[in-house]
Image (tube, grey):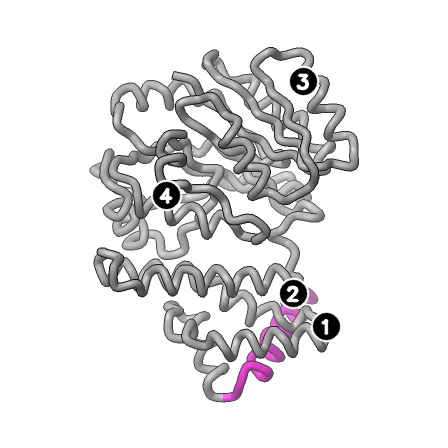
Amino acid sequence: MKISVIIPVYNVEEYLTQCIESVLMQSYDDKEILLINDGSTDGSKSICENYAENYTFIKLINKKNEGLSEARNDGILNASGDYLLFLDSDDFWSEDFLSDVVKILKKYKDLDFLFFRYKNFYQQKNIMVDSHLNMSEEMTKADGPTFLKHIFTHNPGFNWFAVLYLIKRDYIIQYQLFFEKGKKYEDMLWTPQIFLKAKSITYIDKSVYVYRRERTGSITSDFSSENLEDGIFISKFWYKKLMDDALDMDESLKMRLLNNLCTRYFVAIWFSGKLRKNERRNMIRLLKENNIFLKCGKGFVKKTTAFICRAFGFNVCIAICKSLWFVKHKLF
């Protein structure tokens, strides 16, 4: 059973060696590494070339810069493995786990995918914090919607990181589960879809993926107008899909998914105060046009945000959020 590890690479020379070495340390032999150099302008390309020259199972694909989604899609199309894993080039794996994963794949031969947990690595403080996912031991194997219902019953803030899934390549091709080109937070568009279509998945209670936080240039630390607009696009995408009458899904699961997937709309409210005046004006227009999402948010913070927006307007709510972020920054 061959495993393909897809690593999109863009200007990460400082972290790339640690990333690749964490795959090379895996004792499982039947694997390939696809390094998708997405038009890097630093020393990343040279590092990739060096590894590709020294290891026959490492394939280097050089391409013009088109973003993470297209790099992952190129990896999917060029992979020869039975199952695929995505690994971001500024992150790494913390232990030797592929052999154990393959044993599970051989035990459950019909799996569409399996998933696992991650660690947060706060590199400025040099602190590793294990993530937590509350899962019953009885959840050994089920279809995607059943797993989602269990997850959101116990984990309403579930994260959709695409790098936590080992997924059958034929399953991706069958349902054309490629990443949306040109959008940030592409994981929130892709990962829920693989759950909704899956007939057989399982979960491994292992924290093997190390997610690097506090890196300069990371998308998650960039609250630009473009990123916030993409967040609203994600909320619109999922609202339309989940409200489709043709979608046969438990109503309570729909509401839980909407609460989670409309989070990017609320993020746009919370961080619009960081934008320039003309950008903020355009963002408020978008927020007003899509104010249906104010009804979708659950929990104290989202409900309070929705109340302020309805009672006093988006301008007031954004000003309050900006003041709160300023106070937090001064205190901490």
For marks 1 and 4 on the same chain, the one whose residue lies earlier in the sequence: 4
User: Contact (CB < 8 A) between labels 4 and 3?
Assistant: no
Residue, x 26% and y 51% (percent of image)? Answer: 149
Q: Which mark is residue 276?
A: 1
User: Contact (CB < 8 A) between labels 3 and 1?
Assistant: no
Q: Which mark is residue 194?
A: 4
Residue placed most toward the observer, 87 or 238: 238
| Quarter location, residue 207 | top left
Is residue 318 shown in magenta? Answer: yes
Report if residue 303 is visible in the image: no
How many numbered tags mark residues here? 4
For marks 2 and 4 on the same chain, the one whose residue lies earlier in the sequence: 4
For marks 3 and 1 on the same chain, the one whose residue lies earlier in the sequence: 3
Q: Determine the CA span between mark 4 and mark 3.
A: 32 Å
Q: Determine the CA span between mark 1 and mark 4.
A: 37 Å
Residue 133, percent across and down? Answer: 37, 44
Q: Is residue 128 above or below residue 111?
A: below
Secondary-structure class at tag 2 = helix
For marks 2 and 3 on the same chain, the one whose residue lies earlier in the sequence: 3
Q: What residue span does the magenta drawing correspond to? A: 312-330
User: Contact (CB < 8 A) between labels 2 and 1?
Assistant: yes
Question: Which quarter of the image is occupied by the C terminus?
Answer: bottom right
